[in-house]
Image (tube, helix red, strand yellow):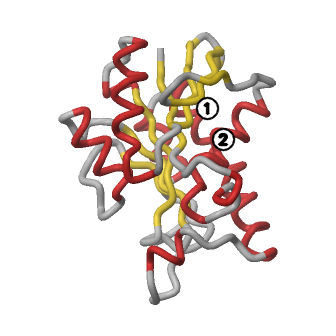
Amino acid sequence: MHLIIGLGNPGREYKYTRHNAGFMAADALAKKLSIQFKKKQDYFWAKTNMGDKAVIIVKPRTFVNLSGKAVKKIAGDSGIKPDKILVIHDDADLPLGALKIKKTGSCAGHNGVASIINELCTKDFSRIRIGIGRDNKDLKNYVLSEFSASEKEVIDKIIDLSLDAISVIIKKGIDEAMQIFNRQIKE
């Protein structure tokens, strides 16, 4: 069983903001797999199969910076170990439209990832980082701003690419996915 976590902020006012790239990917994956999210106290979840692998897709109901609480809860509820967790999140250090797969590592300044590391007491979980770029102004306001129409087209394409990456990770493993997708776009 694999746990696919899309990070984002709950609420309509955040739906199309840069910080919700992980939610956008989780929603797109659920749509592609024709499944609906169910509501739990700490998260939305949907269980299905990708090929012969069982997966649970999750969107925490906490704000991004507190994502670890929900991830710890769903991992505990489902008995899934960190090495079977894939977190999808925005990354202001990658240019808009870039995608990078990471097997493990630090939070690289992302508070949602830091929260997950703190709650799980490990950094040994995989990530798909979706580049949102940055404007060299106030990062907090930037990540909470919506994509422009032209940026939305770029993000939609990278969300589609992230679905391909998720499929390879689940079916063939993280190492193969890193070889395929980390070459496509340079940082």
- Please provide percent x and percent y for residue 129: 48, 55
Query: In percent of the image, x 42 and y 72: which residue is there?
Result: 93
Q: Work out whether residue 1 or residue 181 is closer to the camera in this orientation and state it.
A: 1
Q: Work out whether residue 101 or residue 77 is closer to the camera in this orientation and state it.
A: 77
Query: Toward which corner of the image does residue 139 lie, by quadrant?
Result: bottom left
* Image: 132 above or below 120: below
User: What residue is shown with label 1?
Assistant: 167
- Please provide percent x and percent y for residue 44: 59, 29
User: What residue is shown with label 2?
Assistant: 163
Q: Work out whether residue 166 or residue 11 is closer to the camera in this orientation and state it.
A: 11
Q: Residue furthest bottom?
A: 137
Query: In percent of the image, x 55 and y 22: which residue is there?
Result: 40
* Image: 43 above or below 129: above
Residue type at tag 2: Leu
Residue type at tag 1: Ser
Label 2 sits on a secondary structure element that is helix
| Circles 2, 1 touching at the beta carbon (< 8 Å) | yes
Query: In percent of the image, x 39 and y 32: which residue is there?
Result: 71
Instruction: Give how far apart the Cα atoms at labels 2 and 1 are.
Output: 6 Å
Q: Is residue 31 left or right of residue 179?
A: right
Around disc 2, counting alpha carbons within 10 Å, would you say few (fewer than 14), some (14 to 19), or many (20 or more)? some
